[in-house]
Image (cartoon, grey):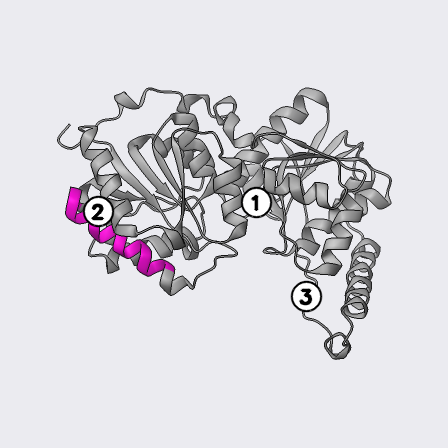
């Protein structure tokens, strides 16, 4: 049986995304100031413990709800009937998980409150039912739920939408952008607008607070991955990146271009970036491997005089470091991040991939880089 915890943390971290680990670091900082006993739920507790030694980490076992719609559900003509069956299936799965028990469920039920760490995981671009399950358990046990500034939506699955709204109804809810605030207002959820926790990164990575003038031979940093909810195919996205890279290579030379990753999975940023670099005639070795420690990923950004990124928290960090950054998005989900959550940040320029000529953007990047006189330093 677990000991009572004053506050238990849960969120989208522990999957290898540097930005998500940053939001966990800030959530730990905030809650440990307020509470004596703080615990973290993690799907990858060994990794979380390695990043945050001394923290009490509780394993959440691999849980999976078969999201495929049942044969009966597909046959029903009425949307309301299909939604009702799907809601029943999700709640049945919730009840099964609760009955199965385990230390993580015991820890939630014995906690003083649950704190949802920042991130944009409350959308059905991800397995939303898995994120809602611990919240449902907390609410069922009478545990209050508060949140860091979150991104919420879109949620197109009507059954999941109703469940999410009901679970967030009595939550002390903070959101990080106007898209999420509009979502809350539309569904009569009370929410406070507050900027993403990532803008406070120097509170947990103080060693990153150095003058970028101290870094010689700074390069143009490029991070690419196929964004959730993209409006174009991965093939078309790669063509866009490759056209940009070819033009940038011709203007400043490949030795002044470097790929970087904000996810530890080699199949994500790393694979797509080395693929595009190679197809653009740039050596794959110009792409750095992923950083296992999120702190190193953020500190590395100061090696760049300009950045082009598809990763939201890389753009956030660029703003903190005052590095010119082009934040690329495709689809509503990432546009809400890059345009609304970064609104008013003068060093960051949102770029909608489907509306921007890649070669013209490459020329702008090259002119910016050459104007700063970094070549030959």
Magenta portion: prevailing SS class: helix
Range covered by the magenta-colored residues: 237-253
Give neighbour class at mark 2: few <14, some 14-19, many 20+ (Cα, 10 Å).
many
Residue 41, visible in the rendered structure: no
For mark 2, give the secondary structure. Answer: helix
For mark 3, give the secondary structure. Answer: loop
Q: Which of marks 2 and 1 is nearer the N terminus?
A: 1
Q: Mark 3 points at which residue?
A: 67
Image quadrant of residue 109? top right
Image quadrant of residue 49? top right
Q: How far apart are marks 2 and 3 (CA)?
A: 43 Å
Q: Residue 324 in the image: state x and y as whole percent.
A: 34, 32
Image quadrant of residue 314? top left
Q: In this view, does 88 lie to the left or right of 51?
A: right
Q: Mark 1 points at which residue?
A: 14
For mark 1, give the secondary structure. Answer: loop
| The stretch drawn in magenta includes residue 24 | no
Q: Which residue is drawn at the image coordinates 58% and 29% (left, top)?
A: 26
Location of residue 213 with respect to 126 vertically, above or below: above
Mark linked to residue 248: 2
Q: Which residue is drawn at the image coordinates 82% and 64% (left, top)?
A: 88
Location of residue 191 with respect to 159 vertically, above or below: above
Give neighbour class at mark 3: few <14, some 14-19, many 20+ (Cα, 10 Å).
few
Q: Quadrant of the C terminus?
A: top left
């Amino acid at each position: 049986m677990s000991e009572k915890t004053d506050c238990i943390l849960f969120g989208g971290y522990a999957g290898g995304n540097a930005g998500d680990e940053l939001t966990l670091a800030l959530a730990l900082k905030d809650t440990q100031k307020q509470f004596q006993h703080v615990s973290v739920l993690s799907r990858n507790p060994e990794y979380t413990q390695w990043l945050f030694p001394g923290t009490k980490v509780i394993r959440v076992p691999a849980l999976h709800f078969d999201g495929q719609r049942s044969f009966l559900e597909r046959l029903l003509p009425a949307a309301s009937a299909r939604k009702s069956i799907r809601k029943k299936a999700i709640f049945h799965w919730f009840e099964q998980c609760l009955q199965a028990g385990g230390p993580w469920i015991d820890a939630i039920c014995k906690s003083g409150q649950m704190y949802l760490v920042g991130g944009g995981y409350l959308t059905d671009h991800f397995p939303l039912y898995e994120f809602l399950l611990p919240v449902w358990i907390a609410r069922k046990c009478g545990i209050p739920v508060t949140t860091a500034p979150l991104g919420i939506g879109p949620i197109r699955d009507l059954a999941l939408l109703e469940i999410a709204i009901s679970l967030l109804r009595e939550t002390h809810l903070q959101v990080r952008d106007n898209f999420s605030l509009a979502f809350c207002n539309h569904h009569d959820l009370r929410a406070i607008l507050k900027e993403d926790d990532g803008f406070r990164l120097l509170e947990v990575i103080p060693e990153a607070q150095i003058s970028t003038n101290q870094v010689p031979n700074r390069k143009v940093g490029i991070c690419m991955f196929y964004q959730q909810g993209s409006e174009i195919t991965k093939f078309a996205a790669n063509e866009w990146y490759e056209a940009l890279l070819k033009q940038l290579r011709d203007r400043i030379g490949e030795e002044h271009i470097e790929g970087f990753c904000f996810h530890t999975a080699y199949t994500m940023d790393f694979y797509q970036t080395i693929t595009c670099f190679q197809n653009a005639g740039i050596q794959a070795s110009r792409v750095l491997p992923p950083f296992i420690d999120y702190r190193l990923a953020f500190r590395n950004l100061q090696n760049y005089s300009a950045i082009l990124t598809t990763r939201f928290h890389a753009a956030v960090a660029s703003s903190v470091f005052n590095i010119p950054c082009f934040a690329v998005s495709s689809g509503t989900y990432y546009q809400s991040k890059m345009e609304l959550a970064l609104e008013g940040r003068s060093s960051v320029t949102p770029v909608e991939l489907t509306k921007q000529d890649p070669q013209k953007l490459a020329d702008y990047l090259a002119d910016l880089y050459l104007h700063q006189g970094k070549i030959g330093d």
